[in-house]
Image: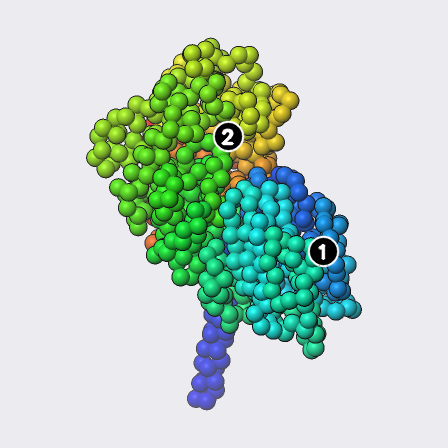
Amino acid sequence: MLNKTIFLLTLVALLSCKKKEEQSTAEEKENLKLTAHVDPFIGTGGHGHTYPGATVPFGMVQVSPDNGRNGWDWCSGYHYSDSIVSGFSNLHLSGTGIGDLADILLMPAAEELDLTGTYETPQDRPYASRYSHKRERAEPGYYSVYLEDPQIKVGLTATQRTGYQKYNYEGAGEASVILDLGFAINWDAPTETAIKIENETTISGYRHSTGWAKNQKVFFVAEFSKPIARHNLVQDKKSVDADSVAGKTTAAQFFFNIDGSRDVIVKVSVSSVSVANAKENFAVSEAVDFETAKADAKKIWEDQLDHIVVATPTDSLKTIFYSALYHTQIAPVTFSDVNGEFRQENDSIVKADFTAYATLSLWDTFRAENPLLTLLEPEKVSDIVNSMLTYYEVHKSLPVWTLYGNETNTMTGNHAIPVIAEAYFKGIKGFDAEQAFEAMKNTQMRDERGLEFLKAFGYIPYDKIDESVTFNLEYAYNDWCVAQMAKALGHDKDYAYFAERSKSYEKLYDPETGFMRGKSSKGAWHEPFDPKFSRHRENTDYTEGNAWQHSWFVLHDTDNFIKLHGGSEPFTEMLEQLFTESSEITGDHISNDISGLIGQYAHGNEPSHHIAYLFNRTGKPWRTQYWINQILKTQYNTTPNGLSGNEDAGQMSAWYVWSSMGLYPFNPASAAYEIGSPVYEKSTINLPSGKRFTIVAEGVSQENFYIQSASLNGEDFNQTSITHEQIITGGELKLVMGATPNKSWGVTTQAE
């Protein structure tokens, strides 16, 4: 009897352990499934300009397929409408509007090819191949495709500074790999390239080019998993019998004996500094094989996506959210090598004790992408600020839009300034605040990019510079940010000067039309005036838009802005008209960036992104809730054409991440967030401190998108904004949702 009892107790214990083990396994599966909701093909169609290839969060390399076409929709190298792949290069831009990079292109082949020709289209390249989306796959950290012509399966993955390409030679023929350093898309063109065979498995070299980045220098080292049996080298379209070549364009074909495994794997590390540095970067992942790198990349992405966990019964909403969160964690990209070195545009080499970042698309990302990083990746924010301050030491101005260490001077304003101010006011440490203020002040006091006219006239006249209205409005906000830093640091005279100059937007407001308008140096309005008129970049008062889209950019002084319109009623009436006006855009050279139209509201471009939240400031937050819900429903989906405009280095997706949770950083430097209309039943932000902030939307549904009441940590909450400090402290914001507006909630207290 005793033995039977012991047996039964043992059996119960074993079953209990098994049950706990099954629960543990189930919990692990629950926690490790977020990458399954990511579709990297979202944004690869339409004008999204994303790429589907492999990278890790903020990684130095982005290994992705290149169709090889020139054209706006091929800015990332890839467009979903295409069916030809020319190769797989190691550097790419996510969602930008100008094509560059696509450096160090590799392509497997199954026969010897002539690389001395001149190629104008993808079909002309002898190594280009057809492919089908039916045999193409992408997930965070991994991409694969079957090349139909050589009958080769390709897999791509990456670590932080090393790209991996795996080729499986299924068909007949001689296994080989092509390296084409002359390959280029759109604006990019090689100026000097070199290839060197170092030993039977290793090659190295460099590719220097000019394009959007005028002085781009990429050094690389590559290692093959099998010895090179023979090779062909090409220098400036001529075959060369040697082990190294150098010229404006160089290319090579390396041949391998396939025995046993029919796979050839190539690992590529890059550096902006030297081949020696590329080798140091390579050494970090030297012992990591393809499958390990792939598994590690997926785990890294799982951890990254776990920053925010959303709950909804609708799978498509999970796909949109986690694909968006994925896209917000791609840029900026790591630029410094493992030894801390990186190259400046003037060819000086900097050695930093922080991670330097490049691909700073600040005109886009200061709005929502950078604010998201302050919440999820504050340590990276200080590194980004230090990267910009290092740039300042060379240029004596903060960056506008940097690519691979180069200033592109793309877009208007100086939006490194709000990024720094936001970091400071959100309590992010790790950079010198006084040094940062000096850089902000001096950048805004230069005599270039229209600032000289702002100082001379008190506004920027349209007869002095193109895009004058947009420049002026954005500088007014930049000035306000400088003023706030000056005040916090005790620089009273600077505070008074920049606070006054931050009101320059008033001089462009036309009370007759209600729009911000171009004004001449003599004080006359720009005539004729059509608020729907758009002209792209030249002979225009507005950047990539029109008066309807650009007249709302007053983030820092909204109470006064509303007063200029005659008060909240006329302001709200015009704001409603923005969304209900016809979507006709007039003009002969309309900007392609005007997309995602709801009336004249253009969600496909960044200047519109804050506008729907202005209703909160007029005492009608239910209109913010209505229009945010409409934008969320209509401007994002799960198809390759799932973005209504350029991804722009994470901004388009960051808007969705914030707004779908029910928050938005309307004025990032204020360190506060506007409350909108969430779509998820529960959104949990896992903060770096280990604390959690949860947004619960009780009763939310497609019909129930209006806030009925709110509480913060159990206390009534009757305001339309919440501070960064309240969020990072942890807690719960509970929103009770309903199908009809509650016109009393959030209208008694407005907080900045």
* Local SS, label 1: loop
Reply above or below: 596 against 688: above
**What's the mark number on residue 624?**
none
Residue 164 horizontal/vertical position (percent): 58, 63
Q: Is residue 82 left or right of residue 455?
A: right
Residue 723 horizontal/vertical position (percent): 34, 39
- Residue kind at label 1, given as amino acid type: Thr
Q: Earlier along the polypeptide chain: callout 2 or callout 1?
A: 1
Residue 618 in view, yes or no? no
- Residue kind at label 2, given as amino acid type: Ser
Residue at the spot of label 2: 608
Residue 309 horizontal/vertical position (percent): 47, 51
Reply above or below: 742 against 235: above
Residue at 47% from the left image edge and 73% from the top image edge: 16
Q: Is residue 600 left or right of residue 240?
A: left
Query: For this rendering, which residue is in front, 196 or 373?
Result: 196
* Local SS, label 2: helix
Residue at the spot of label 1: 116
